[in-house]
Amino acid sequence: MTDSKRPDPLFINSLEKGLRVMRAFTPESTEMTLGEIALKTELSKSSVQRLCHTLHELGYLQKEEKSKSFRPTLKYLDFSWSYLHSDQLVRLATPRLIDLGRKLKITVNLAELDGTDIVFTIRNPYNQAPYYSTFLGRRVPAVLTTPGRVLLSFKTDDEVRAIVDSWDGTNPLFLTYKVIDDRDKIFEEILLARKQGYCISESQGASSSLINIAVPVIDGRGNPLAAIQSPMAASEWDRERIVREVLPHLVEAANSI
């Protein structure tokens, strides 16, 4: 937001409010009433009513007559489609990651850093991957994931510590797999990723566990663009085998991109 003392004449407040309503719908809030949307967006109920009506008329929100609630329509996917086709990195990486997944018979994903979160922009599941691992656009705090930690490793120690300390403690991955959430351990793992050039860690699930490994995709100036990540079942793989048999292929794919 702009400084309230120096308003930006080009900033359209009504558009910002409309986008705030659209962003209010999350995996935890897939359908909401006007009151719930107003509470979540911190907008007045009258404003929310007008915004939701407009979005409904434009086809972005579906209204349930009985419950008087709203939920997103398929039109939301238009934004994802437009972005993915405009992202040159996604276009370059997709065929390489598909080939890599088929060759090694593993799941291969691509994640990009957005602020202090990572967003999965390529999902290439293999075999019996959990359904949540197929969702494009999934946003997760970077400190909780191997791709996030390997990307954060390019920042300075002070920047890393500030990001780790600013994490609010919420952990959406607990819905699926438990990951390291001790701040000191996270900081140490990020520093280790910087030293070795990759990040590997284990996450515990209700009935199984995964070993995740990630390597950075770096541009010609040494800046990280994204990370290639592969989760593998601990019942079939161990760390030593992953580093020996999988890591070289991930690094080769990252370099080719």
Image (cartoon, helix red, strand yellow):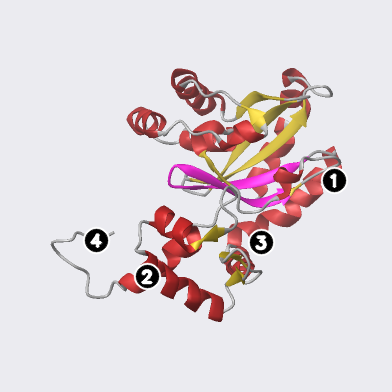
Q: Is the magenta stretch mostly helix, strand or loop?
A: strand
Of 95 and 65, nearer the camera is 65
For image coordinates 73% across by 27% down, the residue present is 210
Q: Residue furthest left?
A: 5
Q: Give the range drawn in magenta.
A: 107-123
Relative to 94, say whether 69 is above or below. Answer: below
Mark 2 and mark 1: Cα distance apart in space: 53 Å
For image coordinates 61% across by 36% down, the residue present is 215
Position of the N terminus by quadrant = bottom left
Mark 4 and mark 3: Cα distance apart in space: 34 Å
Residue 58: give its label.
Answer: none
Give the labeled residue for mark 4. 2
Q: Residues within 10 Å of mark 4 (few under 14, many from 20)?
A: few
Q: Is residue 86 left or right of residue 166?
A: right
Q: Which amino acid does label 3 sit on?
A: Arg
Give the labeled residue for mark 3. 91
Q: Is residue 184 left or right of residue 126?
A: left
Residue 102: give its label.
Answer: 1
Mark 3 and mark 2: Cα distance apart in space: 43 Å
Q: Earlier in the sequence, mark 4 or mark 2?
A: 4
Give the labeled residue for mark 2. 46
Q: Which of marks 1 and 3 is nearer the N terminus?
A: 3
Residue 109 spot, x, y in % from top left: 69, 45
> Disc count in the image?
4
Tell me the SS state at disc 2: helix
Q: Earlier in the sequence, mark 3 or mark 2?
A: 2
